[in-house]
Amino acid sequence: MAESKELQVKGKQEVASPVEQTRPGVVFTPDVDIFENDRQINLLADMPGVDPGDVKIDLKDGLLTVSGEVQPFEGKDESDVLIEFEVGRYYRQFTLSEVVDQNKIEAKLEDGVLRLTLPKAEKAIPRQIAVTAG
Amino acid sequence: MFARRLFDFPLGGWQHQFADLERMSRQMDQLTQAVMGRPGMNWLSAKVFPAVNLTEDKDKYHVRAELPGIKADALDIQVNGRNLTITGERTIPSEGENIRYHRKEREAGKFSRVIGLPGDIDADNVDAKMFNGVLTVSIAKSEAAKPKQITVH
């Protein structure tokens, strides 16, 4: 394969939608890779700083919502010298064109990357999904 | 009569013909402020990947970077004088045959960045940890660089 290129700084994208958040703070859209094969749809989202217990995944009527909370990085005695990125929670929504078997959804969060596996099947009643730590 | 009409403008005399230009220029400044001043906006003050936050308390500097998907052993951290160098590579493993991508926003590649710290440091006392995709490097300040309390008597 070709040699690796240099990574460039990409500013974090703030959520553009008008959905009002009840808590103060910045909300970012995480970068995602979405791909599928014949049996399942996979979603990989970069959400650094999010603990496995702080991810919420909701699938209802074909609308998939992924959100993650972050704890503030800094201790309270620290003062800023140079700040180049902001810390905020993550939120993104997708409409799924395929129907998904909700009972078999798997989610894993490792090193700040969420891996969501959505097996294709009939439409089912909406429910919350638990996340296992990576 | 002509002169009196000119002097009625608040800016006075010959300056009034530039008032419109000045007002437009002020409005353009306000527009750009509105675009650039929003929190979390793409004001890319970092020119090199990764973007870092450098903070200090009285004993240490703390450098943090968001590096999702990178394991601790894929990073190379070095300290030299007042410079901290963070080098590494992000790889995105291939997901297999017969897959169709709908979206591909995450990027892979190499990076290396040197961060100059504002004071002298103790190179034997540097701690780096990687947790949930966030790298935190804590660098102890040298004794001479720590703030000293002076008593007044």
Image (spheres, rainbow, N blue to C red):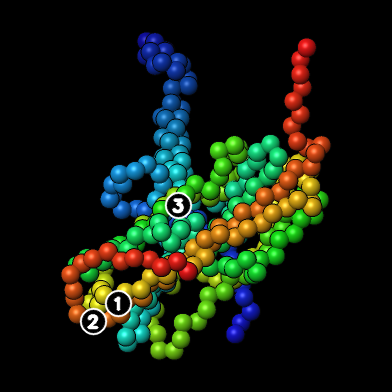
Please state which of the two labelled residues, at mark 1 or mark 3, is closer to the viewer. 1
User: What's the chain of the residue with tag 2?
Assistant: A
Dot 3 corresponds to which residue?
A: A70
Q: Position of residue B34 (x, y in %)?
A: 42, 40
Q: Looking at this view, is B138 or B88 the one in front?
A: B138
Q: Are marks 2 and 1 on the same chain?
A: yes
The answer to whether marks 2 and 1 mark residues whose Cβ atoms lie closer than 8 Å is yes
- Vertical position of residue A109 compared to residue A13: above or below: below
What is the three-letter code of the residue carrying label 3?
Val
Q: Position of residue A22 (x, y in %)?
A: 30, 44
* Residue at the farthest bottom position: B97
Give the distance between the C-alpha atoms of the residues marked 2 and 3, in whole angstroms. Answer: 33 Å
Q: Position of residue A8 (x, y in %)?
A: 58, 63
Q: Is residue A32 visible?
A: no
> In the picture, residue B38 is in which quadrant?
top left
- Vertical position of residue A96 compared to residue B36: above or below: below
Quarter of the figure with the C terminus of chain B: top right
User: What's the chain of the residue with tag 1?
Assistant: A
What is the three-letter code of the residue carrying label 1?
Lys
Give the distance between the C-alpha atoms of the residues marked 1 and 3, in whole angstroms. Answer: 27 Å
Using the image, tell me which numbered label, if any, was put on residue A121.
Answer: 2
Dot 1 corresponds to which residue?
A: A104
For the residue labelled by badge 1, is the local secondary structure a helix, a strand or a loop?
helix
The answer to whether marks 1 and 3 mark residues whose Cβ atoms lie closer than 8 Å is no
Using the image, tell me which numbered label, if any, was put on residue A92.
Answer: none
